[in-house]
Amino acid sequence: MRKLVLAISMLALAGSAAFADPILDRQALMKERGKIVGGLSKVVKGEDPFDAAAVLTQLQALQANAEKLDVDALFPAGSDKGDTTASPKIWEDMGGFKAAEDKYLADVKAAAAAAPADVDTLKTSFGTIASNCGTCHQSYRVKKG
């Protein structure tokens, strides 16, 4: 029994440590997302050559990133205060924010599943993904500076 209590305690601690600081954790997740999107953007703009395998790897990484975003854990009540650009609109319209993130995830999954074979196909799916980013930033992010 003692081992069971210890195991449960360790799992609880690990779970709480996973999102110990929701602001820092969501910022790290969004920075990772931005880096991946930036890499895909270079391919779309022709700054980097199109490589189907590399593009698929980036889309899969973007999907994994999107799947890690747990809105309830990363945007709990009270985490709108502090060093954050998350807009108060997130907490005022949590349903809309979750719907925007769900749409983004669905579009990223579709892009990864399609495995673009050429840059024109990538441009189409990337345009949808980038549009999701822009829409969410306009609605749910405080503008910097």
Image: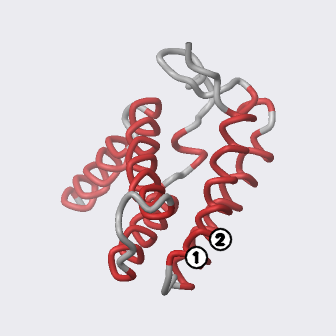
* Other residues around mark 2 within 10 Å, as few (<14) / some (14–19) / many (≥20): few
Residue placed under numbered mark 2 in the picture: 124
Q: Secondary structure at mark 2?
A: helix
Which residue is at 56% across, 19% downward?
144
Instruction: From the viewer's perspective, tell me whether residue 14 is left or right of residue 61.
Output: left
Q: Is residue 125 above or below residue 121?
A: above
Which residue is at 43% across, 51% downward?
38
Q: Name the amino acid, label 2.
A: Thr
Whether residues under marks 1 and 2 lie with C-beta atoms below 8 angstroms apart, the answer is yes
Which residue is at 45% across, 46% downward?
34
- Tell which of 95 and 43 is nearer to you: 43
- Tell which of 136 and 68 is nearer to you: 136
Instruction: From the viewer's perspective, tell me whether residue 2 is left or right of residue 8.
Output: left
**Residue 72 on image: x %, y %:** 60, 45
Which residue is at 50% across, 82% downward?
118
Say the numbered circle drawn on residue 132.
none
Residue placed under numbered mark 1 in the picture: 120
**Residue 62 on image: x %, y %:** 45, 63
**Residue 60 on image: x %, y %:** 42, 72
